[in-house]
Amino acid sequence: MTSDTQNDALISEASDWLAYLYSGDATDEGEARFKAWIRADRAHEAAFRQVNAAFEALDQLDDIEQQLPAPSARVVPIAAAVDKQHTPWAVWVAGVVAVAAALLVTVYLPQGTEPGLADTRLYETGVGEVKTVSLPDGSVVTLGANSALSARFTGEERDAELVRGRAYFDIARDEARRFDIAVGETEVRVLGTAFDIRKGPEDVRVSVTEGLVEVVDRQPASDVETPPVWLRPGEQVAADLSGNMGETVSFNPADALSWREGRLSYADAKLADIVADARRYHRGEIRFGDAAIADLRITTSFRTNRLDELFAGLDAMGAIRVDRRPRGLIVLADPGDAFEEEE
């Protein structure tokens, strides 16, 4: 069997499983068999992720409704190995998934790239969890707490998106394939280097520790192309959520990257940014009782598994009242404000 034939068979099998899971007919036994299939071979997981991504992207394609089957259409049976009697809804879902699989090359693979060469993966961490993952190209990424990174590789391209949170990248050098990382309206481009990206509530911050990094506005507001910002080791730039970049500044790597060792450190930072990071380690809610407090500038350092160090420090300042509520709710308020009742 040729590699193309093997790939077509994998995509077809992954499509059957996706249709089965979306059909409404899935049973515990069927889901167990699906999990066993996924675990059996990494190629199974890669194929399933590709089909699922294409399925979710169908609504972004023009005139897609004309390509979808009617709910009563006859299509290939879903996941035949499951031995189910399929409902009309399940059959229609199978038809939609079949369209997604057929459009997979058009949607996800660049021109000239054969089907099956794209490897798309999603890496996530939970609240308080920091982990290091190895990418298919040999790059290594440390994901911060409650963060998500989507990465896609082909024989010609390396692309990723920092969906939320923070990550430290140690990119394997590849002169033939630049590594592009999208973060909102900002894009980071490298061949092989090391840097940190933090996606905050108001901006995206890129801090370089090794090599040379290019940072660009993905969608400039005018037709005039915005020149890229080139960062060298020890340099940092912040871009707002529209992609507009500020001045290049120097930074202290020991403070900026201390999160990898379980400590968050800040020098003259907005309290809003500090709290945004703290929320990734706190299973309850941290709320501002007074919006003006969020703009206060704070210098602090605390362990990520001891957030009480942060709250104790804020209490000691005298300018902020820390109200601790049931179920992990923390309210930061002005000391002169009336006590806010829990909703």
Image (tube, rainbow, N blue to C red):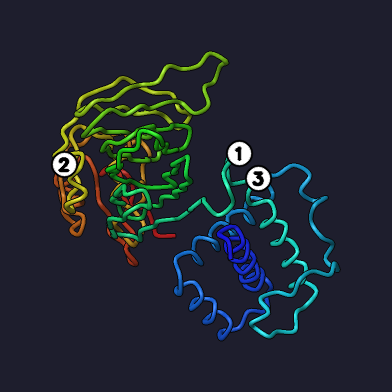
Identify which amino acid the numbered label 2 is placed on. Answer: Thr
If you read the primary sequence from the N terminus, does the residue marked by circle 1 or circle 2 appear first? 1
Mark 3 crowdedness (10 Å alpha carbons): few <14, some 14-19, many ≥20: few
- Kindly report which numbered mark, 1 or 3, lies closer to the viewer in this rendering: 1
Q: Is residue 97 visible?
A: yes
**Given this view, does label 1 or label 2 mark the residue nearer the observer?**
1
Q: Which residue is mark 2?
A: 300
Please say if 171 is above or below 232. Answer: below
* Residue at the image point whose x is 32% and y is 22% from the top: 230
Query: As rendered, which of 95 and 337 lies closer to the eye?
Result: 95
Residue identified by numbered label 1: 111
Give the residue type at disc 3: Thr
- Quadrant in the rendering for residue 132: bottom left
Q: Position of residue 81 (x, y in %)?
A: 64, 82
Residue 84 location (% of width, % of height): 70, 84
- Secondary structure at numbered mark 1: loop
Q: CA distance from mark 1 to mark 3?
A: 8 Å
For this view, does 35 lie left or right of residue 205? right
Quadrant in which the N terminus is drawn: bottom right
Q: Quadrant of residue 256?
A: top left
Depth check, front residue: 187 or 99 = 99
| Residue found 35% across the figure and 61% down from its top | 126
In the structure shown, which secondary structural element does the residue marked by tag 3 occupy? helix
Q: Is residue 10 left or right of residue 85?
A: left
- Disc 1/disc 2 C-alpha distance (Å): 50 Å
Sort mark 1 into few (<14), some (14-19) or many (20+) by Cα contacts within 10 Å: few
